[in-house]
Image: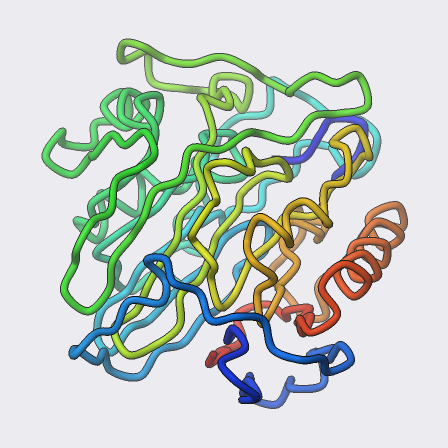
Amino acid sequence: MPNLDRRRFLRDAAASTALVTAGGLASTALAAPARAAAPVATGPAAAATTRRAGRVSFRWWGTAGWRIDIGDRTVLVDPFLSRIDTGLFAGAFDPSTSLDVRADVVDAHVDRAETVLVTHTHWDHFMDVPHIAGRTGARVFGTLTAYHLGLAYGVPSGQLSAVKGGEVLDFGDYTVEVVASLHSRNASYSVAFPGVRVDPPAKPATIADLPEGDTLNYVLRIAGGPSVFFMGASDFAARNLAGIAPDVAMVALNSTNVTADYVPRLMAALDYPKVVVPVHFDTFETELRNPPPVAPSDRAQLDKLIAAVRESSPRSRVLVPAYDTAYHF
């Protein structure tokens, strides 16, 4: 989720060129200057596979939310579609804002899901997840806090899987690697709504009832397709990213500069991904409508992030996504 002082796809293989397409919105791809390819990764992302998944598409749902369709199978990451108004972008943030799920909006986008990956449990990442789990029967992966919050909402324990980082989970057409990570910090070097839930609490009623609860990243590796890194907050533990080397990196916008050398260190830790997709840059308390709205301060930060990617990883392409648009990496 953002800090409270505002809001804050394929790796080079020899000399090949990545293909990134989007229905009618290919112009949002910002290509960096070409440069010699980096050595091919020898870690898990470079492992050969004899399987091949069906057609794969990636749709950004704002904030850090994604829908990934792999043939007839659907994976969601941090699905937040209710986009409730907390006053955050109007300068009148209200921590007592009710967690009123907009079921009609969520259901219009989520017709199915088998796997939901939760990076952390702030409201703009988690609040719609219990409703989606109840409607689709999807299995939810997240921290122990996400597990206990899921129970508090009445999600059956059989649909909840607590993970810590280091797990590599095989789903046949795709695998998910869980990466222990860090949440971004505001200008006061602190995290909004910190804390964890070690037991099921009362059912959350307000956004303040959903703490950060520790933070995870995920690497989705698709059989015969790309490997994609998902962030939900703009900090990371570089040592935990060793050997991941994803083709595509969904990178959370940093709202402040308190995390030293955020972009250069992240690009190096990820071994310079072929495609970098900024996320969590939109004004996420409005209707999901293109073009994505961006607060003035976030626009400046987004421009800085793009410039930093181009400087530190010049062979990476930057794709600034549009809402609910199918991208094929």
- The answer to whether residue 195 is left or right of residue 68 is right
Task: Relative to 329, say whether 113 is above or below.
Answer: above
Q: Position of residue 245 (x, y in %)?
A: 47, 59
Give the colour scheme of this rendering: rainbow
Task: Relative to 257, say whether 266 is above or below.
Answer: below
- How many numbered marks have been drawn onto this rendered protein structure? 0
- Residue 21 in view (yes/no): no
Tell me the quarter of the image containing the N terminus: top right
Q: Nearer the viewer, residue 300 or 39?
A: 39
- Residue 2 in view (yes/no): yes
Q: Residue at x 59, y 40 (%)?
A: 84
Residue most extreme to the left: 158
Specify the quadrant of the image occupied by residue 107: bottom left
Q: Position of residue 153 (x, y in %)?
A: 28, 26
Q: Residue at x 50, y 36 (%)?
A: 239
Task: Relative to 151, say whether 115 is above or below.
Answer: below
Q: Residue at x 59, y 67 (%)?
A: 323
Task: Relative to 174, say whether 186 is above or below.
Answer: above
Q: Position of residue 162 (x, y in %)?
A: 25, 30
Q: Position of residue 114 (x, y in %)?
A: 21, 56
- The answer to whether residue 234 is left or right of residue 75 is right
Q: Nearer the viewer, residue 153 or 13?
A: 13
Q: Residue at x 58, y 29 (%)?
A: 183
